Amino acid sequence: MDYAIIALKVIVGLSILNVWLVQYNKATRWRGGDAATIFEEFEVYGMPVWSVYVVGTLKVILSVLLIISIWYAALQLPAAVGLAILLAGSIAAHFKIGDPLIKSFPASLFLVMSVLIAYSANGL
């Protein structure tokens, strides 16, 4: 397996796990609006509280699967595509509330990385 793709998997997987498991209750410059926590961020986006748990669970599971795909290649495509879809939703949420473009930078970067990972799953 290409070492660059392995590196991308580790970067994307660990970064998303960090956001959802470590930084979820901390203010960062990337949060939507003036939100200080992930729950406040979803509120700013106009999303219900239950959606935080659904999106968070999906992102954590898909991130773990992406890392596991280093050893089990069959998981690579579904994990990368699933994350790409969720990350596209993150970017759309930032645009919906009129955030400055810089706030969607991490989601955009991880979206591009996820697309590259998905693309490489087809051996292209």
Image: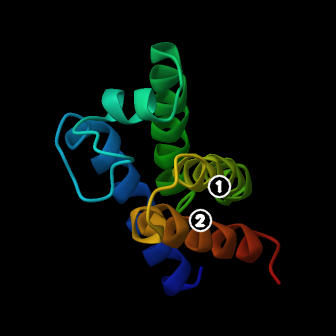
Q: Which mark is residue 88?
A: 1
How many numbered marks have been drawn onto this rendered protein structure?
Answer: 2
Q: Amino acid at mark 1?
A: Ala
Q: Nearer the viewer, residue 45 or 66?
A: 45
Quarter the N terminus occupies: bottom right
Residue drawn where x is 71% and y is 67% of the image: 118
Query: Do residues under tags 2 and 1 come within 8 Å of each other at their CB atoms?
Result: yes
Q: Position of residue 70 (x, y in %)?
A: 52, 63
Q: Nearer the viewer, residue 42 or 6?
A: 42
* Quarter holding residue 102: bottom left
**In the image, is 21 to the left or to the right of 102?**
left
Q: Which mark is residue 23?
A: none
**Outermost residue, front side:** 98
Quarter the C terminus occupies: bottom right
Residue drawn where x is 68% and y is 69% of the image: 115
Residue at disc 2, secondary structure: helix
Q: Amino acid at mark 2?
A: Leu
**In the image, is 49 to the left or to the right of 82?**
left
Write down the residue under mark 2: 111
Q: Position of residue 68 (x, y in %)?
A: 50, 52
Q: Position of residue 53 (x, y in %)?
A: 46, 21
| Spatial separation of the CA atoms under disc 2 and disc 1 | 7 Å
108 is higher (above) or lower (below) than 52: below
Q: Indicate which disc, 2 or 1, sits on the residue closer to the N terminus.
A: 1
27 is higher (above) or lower (below) than 24: below
Residue drawn where x is 39% and y is 47% of the image: 32
